[in-house]
Image: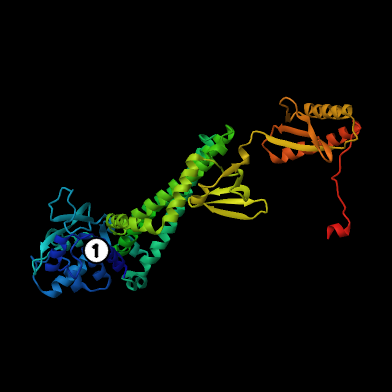
Amino acid sequence: MIATLLLATVTAEAQLLPKNTTQEKTEKDKPSDPLGRDTPRGTVAGFLSAVSDNDFEKAAQYLDTRSISRRSRKTADLAKDFGTLLDKGGRINPPAMLNGDTSGKQNDDLPDDTDKIGTIHSGNKDVDVLLQRIADETNQQIWVFSTQTVSQIAVLQKNIEDPLINSFLPSTLIEDKWYGAPIGHWLAVIIIFILSYGITWIVMRGIIRAMHHLFLKNKTGKNVVDAFIAPISLYLAVWVFGLSCSYAGITILLRQYFGQLNVIIAWVALALLLWRLIDVFASMIQKRLSRNGRFKSFSSIIFFTRRITKFFFVVLTLILILDNLGVDVTAGLAALGIGGIALALGAQKTLENFIGSVAIILDHPIHIGDYCKIGDNTVGTIEDIGMRSTRVRTNDRTVITIPNGTLSTQQIENYARRDRILMTNKLRIRYDARPAQVKDLVNRINEIFAATPQIIQDPLAARFTGFIPEAMIIEIFVYVATADFNEFLRVQQDVMLQIMDAVEASGCSFALPIQTFLPKQAQA
């Protein structure tokens, strides 16, 4: 069953491989091999699957036995001995490293019809395990274990010792099997993995702490080094695990399966390292910009770039994992390219929002933390600028989500960009005030402004501007030198209280609105 999982990669690849008209005609005339021997990867997976099921007669069909007697018992025993040989001292490349093309690997030093897929350690030397492409009874090209490899099985087996792991296991755990592998080997694999990761994590932790004390003096350097602990520990644990399994003599079925898993975990560890480094360097840039007072200007660009970079690495890691599982990524990407037009037509709003987000990032009319008015009604603080939408926290503490496509076309009034805030008001003075009193009041108000350091006078702040039916008007028009609205309200409150005292001191008084009362008959 384990080897069946390996064989699934061949099936997935066959489903995704593009075919042109000529290939289709050829395949119709020449059907694929029912045992999956069309490719080196299929041959290895099929052989291991047959061995795991103890079907040695089927396993023998993956060997080139043309130079051996055709007695079925002989070839079946030969396949069984070869499986045992691989268990004790064999190493086969993970499925991702085995060629999934019918032509095999072409860029090596071997003939075009021969592929090296592993080695067998016998005595003090390593013997190559070779696959060879031959023609079967129907004249179809298939890949089988070469005559050179098969002919050495009997000789190699004499020099192979029992696996080290078997000397520590009771016979029950060796004889009883689960999915074609001894139960004891399954338990050993779990223990080896835990020990591998634990040891490498402890070693890495010790090295990092030593570097902290000896070389690293600032927090940023420590954060960079700390980002390496988990990914490097995981990466080293994978290789320590693989070497330990090989040294302990874990059955080839488990080593082949976990060898594929090791490659995937290694890519995941690398992606995790890059992910953590992105966060560390983004934080470092943010702190540097904050010290220069420029963080707000570039905060949205930093957040957006970090997300795009992470998204890119996630996609790249998934592509590499699929490639290691045997899926033809090139064909998949080609299919995505062909379907891109249809996807674009069906996701116009999504693309519009993405383009809108890019426009916002490049033009940066707003940044995270800015207090803005968007359109006619939406007023609040920008909480997040995403790839699809922007979130705004309103004064009522609700959150409004605005698609970036819509936001990029809206009128945006950014209060956070103010270098000063306007303070304006109209004082209504009663008509019983004499001209000298009004002039004195205007002077007193200007003196208040002059004595307030936060107020900018350009050149006078208070002026007598005219008459209305119910009052005389003194207009105030000044700027408060702050961008903080709370600070502006504090200054405005202090100034208004002083103006009330100035009105009383000048002998003037505020005019009340005129109310006209009509008889009920007139109202009717």
* Residue extending furthest toward the top: 459
Drawn side of residue 205 relative to residue 323, left or right: right
The front one of 113 and 165 is 113
Q: Say which element carries label 1.
A: helix
Front position in the image: 479 or 56: 479
Look at the picture and state if 117 lies above or below 479.
below
Coloring applied to the structure: rainbow
Residue 355 is left or right of residue 50, and the answer is: right
Displayed quadrant of residue 438 = top right
State the residue at coordinates (59%, 33%).
Answer: 293
**Left or right relative to 27: residue 179:** right
Where does label 1 land, which residue? 14
Tell me residue 33's x, y (percent). 17, 68
Residue 351 visible (yes or no): yes
Report the side of 31 relative to 480 (left or right).
left
Can you give x and y, in whole percent of width and height, for residue 220 in the image?
Answer: 53, 38
Report the amino acid beneath label 1.
Ala
